[in-house]
Amino acid sequence: MDINFSDPALYNIYQKVANRERLDLEDGLVLYRSDDLTGVGRLADIERKRRYERNTFYVYNQHLNYTNVCINRCLFCGFSRDEGEEGAYTFSLNDIDEHIRSRLHEPVREVHVVGGLNPALPFSYYVDLLGLIRDLRPDATLKAFTAVEIDFISRIAGFGIKETLRELKRAGLAMMPGGGAEVLNERIHRSLYPKKIGPERWLEVIKAAHEMGITTNATMLYGHIETLKERVMHLIALRHLQDETGGITAFIPLSFHPEKTRLSHLPPNVGVDDLKTVAVSRLMLDNVPHIKAYWVMVTPGLAQVAMSFGADDLDGTIIEEKITHMAGAKTPKGISCNNMRNLILSGGFRPVERDAFYNCGIYNP
């Protein structure tokens, strides 16, 4: 295969990609620093099409953000509130029942549950929440609670991580989202989210979940105070974990929205950085099956372009996403299956509906 790059530094990486050799830290930095955006995208596209040809996956899912009361109050978060503060909320079990029942007529295949760390909620709340959704949606995968929430819930319960996961799994937990990793770096942890669990604890909780047979996603929140080297080191840390456990199903780069946060002085991310991050993620994470372009954060239009930069998944219909929108996102809070399929088709790819574990349904052109 003949391929031309305007940046000669990409040729060495091309040889590694062609030979299926693992990229290292310096390779990741070369990709990020290259001014040949198209070339970086073409390298990621080689790997993406090697795995999935022109298939792009999506899921019919519903988000439930059960509370925004949170004791961590991370500087980059526009979602969290203190108890009693204007805009603070916590769903009762009756509220959750109403939210789930309101969409029982829709073919939801995954319910995605995340929230803040609310010290007023007992352990029984989380068990009952899972059981309620499982009973209302027995055919949907219940993907709930980040590693940060699991750590917090374990302390509320007085259990170890594995015992906590065992009880939540009995109640219906089938998979965990990948949030809360931010950037796995102690400098950034101390600067932006000192009350939240740090890099080692996040990795420890995710590893425990994998050992319990609970698959997870993984994320990286980029575009704030991190360096390019810290981004690539984050990807390498995830790759090491995946080498050990194999439990990460998908990686989701999360583009930081500063507008309604305490970091509002920072400039918003630009499309070039978003596309490069998707591409670098695909190339560095050679052992992670799927790379998502999370349209809520990067816009549906840029997510469509990201399919040619290594992304093979556009997440899903979402329905009622709050966290990113409370930080200032202007994207829709949900998207229909028809619009999702059209987005993928018009980008030159083949839409494939899936469930949370990438069991695929029929193709609907």
Image (spheres, helix red, strand yellow):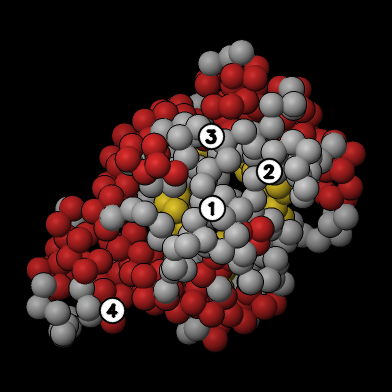
Q: Residues within 10 Å of mark 2 (few under 14, many from 20)?
A: many
Task: Give amino acid for label 3.
Answer: Val
Percent x, y of residue 224: 41, 57
Kindly identify which residue carries mark 4. Answer: 37
Q: Quadrant of residue 186?
A: top left
Tell which of 118 and 154 is nearer to you. 118
Kindly identify which residue carries mark 1. Answer: 262
Q: Quadrant of residue 344?
A: bottom right
Badge 2 or badge 4: first in the primary sequence: 4
Badge 2 or badge 3: first in the primary sequence: 2
- Residue occupying the point 14% across, 79% down: 7
User: Foreground mark, 1 or 3?
Assistant: 1
Is 79 located above or below residue 354 in the figure? above
- Residue occupying the point 53% across, 43% down: 74
Badge 3 or badge 4: first in the primary sequence: 4
Task: Give amino acid for label 2.
Answer: Arg
Q: Residues within 10 Å of mark 4 (few under 14, many from 20)?
A: many
Badge 1 or badge 3: first in the primary sequence: 3
The image shows a total of numbered marks equal to: 4
Task: Give amino acid for label 1.
Answer: Arg
Task: Give amino acid for label 4.
Answer: Leu
Say whether residue 101 is left or right of residue 85.
right
Kindly identify which residue carries mark 2. Answer: 81
Q: Quadrant of residue 122?
A: top right
Secondary structure state at the residue bearing disc 2: loop
Secondary structure state at the residue bearing disc 3: helix
